[in-house]
Amino acid sequence: MNTKLIFTIAKSLLVARWRQTLVAAIGVTFSIAMFITLLGFMTGLNDLLDGLILNRTPHIKLYNELKANPNQPIDISDKFKNHYNFIHSVKPSGTRAEIYNYGAIIDALKNDKRVFGVAPKLVAQVFYNVGAIDVTGVINGIDVEAENKLFYFQDYVTAGKFIDLKNTPNSIILGKGLADKMLANIGDVVQVTTPKGDRIQLKVVGYFQSGLQDFDKTQSYSSLTTAQKLLGKPSNYVTDIQIKLTDMTLAPLVGQEYAKVFNLDAEDIQTANSQFETGSAVRSIISYAVGITLLVVAGFGIYNILNMMIYEKMDSIAILKATGFSGKDVNIIFISIALTIGFFGGLAGLISGFSLSVVIDNVPFNTAALPTIKTYPINYNPKFYVIGIIFSLITTYFAGLFPARKASKIDPVVIIRGKIK
């Protein structure tokens, strides 16, 4: 088998039918370009939507859940141990929201190699005083620098500086929806009341906007010290310990481990946000399905073109076989034609897909709900480009395989005899 000669013949057949070759290559180019663009846009959108929640959610949250004691006196009484006991309206007792000895717990967590970072938090239920109206809400007391490191806090502060929470005593960053409701501007002083009736005045140093409107109408942030002062608690009072791991997938197992070790309740990110993971998975599946469908359709186009080429080149195939080319050689010629179309069409598709992605990435996307987002989201993951070119070659290979096998089985005697008649 003369490999060089075989590829020269394949090239000649490609050039001889260059219009059909161009149409097939354009079909592959369009399919790959749409595959790359669609997948990049959909996964970028997934990252944006998930980031609204997942970026603000710890991988593991340690806290004390308000719950009734499972061991009721009647259950441990010898007198009623052989009875079925039904207890109604059991009230929790002896349970406090405070995490005891949280400093030692944080030190232990920081020494765990699986832990990326830890941030304490104090959640305070309050009433925002708006004239004669009290608006219910929540103030999150945070370690400002730790919160920014783990949860990109500064990216969600749309006005003012996040570090002012630490530097300015008795300060607060209001949710944008809450600030609009209270008509509070930066520099204003707002008054809040605790459930116990204590009142404190806080200076507004910024606005916070998460992209979730209901969240922004009730939530606000202060420093941990300010929140402790608001509740009249000591400096070692916190209600939550937020943990981010180096590997998020370990959260369920590690959360169970920490719950046993520290005798606390643990909530992992998979449990808290399972609906978002499900939505992302479904959107990704749809994107892949549409992209692969485009490639398969392009493959049928190549199949039809090669079939037509075989019928039109019956004489040439017969001559090749009559002059000593085997069926295997003819098979290689037509598969080479298909793979050439797939490779160059796929390469052009990758370039076109990347160009379209760049164009979309620069299209303005302005919405009041997401002020930090300026353009449409695009994911430039190299994995999509590798998948695209591989699928391009696989699709075109199978599109050329069946016509090639048909061409390899042509009997040159029958063809030539038919021409003589």
Image (cartoon, rainbow, N blue to C red):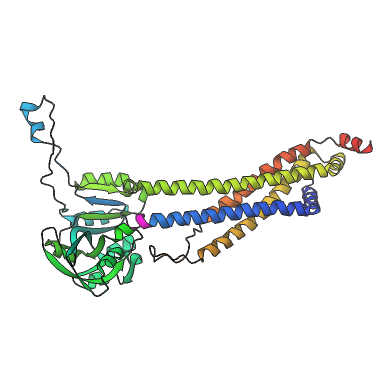
Q: Between residue 374 and residue 226, name the one nearer to us.
A: 374
Whole-percent x, y for residue 131 in the image: 18, 67
Residue drawn at the location 26% of the way across and 60% of the way down: 219
Q: Residue furthest top?
A: 82
Quarter occupied by the N terminus: top right
- Quick check: can you spot residue 343? no
Answer above or below: position of 333 versus 109.
above
Q: Residue furthest right?
A: 421
Answer above or below: position of 207 versus 24.
below
Whole-percent x, y for residue 206 in the image: 28, 70
Quarter holding residue 411: top right
Residue 56 shown in magenta: yes
Q: Between residue 86 and residue 284, name the one nearer to us.
A: 86
Whole-percent x, y for residue 157 in the image: 32, 67
Answer above or below: position of 400 versus 128.
above
- Residue 215 horizontal side relative to residue 363, left or right: left
Quarter holding residue 304: top right
Give the residues in magenta.
52-57
Whole-percent x, y for residue 330 in the image: 78, 42
Residue drawn at the location 82% of the way across and 41% of the way down: 325
Q: Residue furthest bottom?
A: 187
- Quick check: can you spot residue 269? yes
Residue 119 shown in magenta: no
- Residue 54 horizontal side relative to residue 409, left or right: left
Quarter occupied by the C terminus: top right
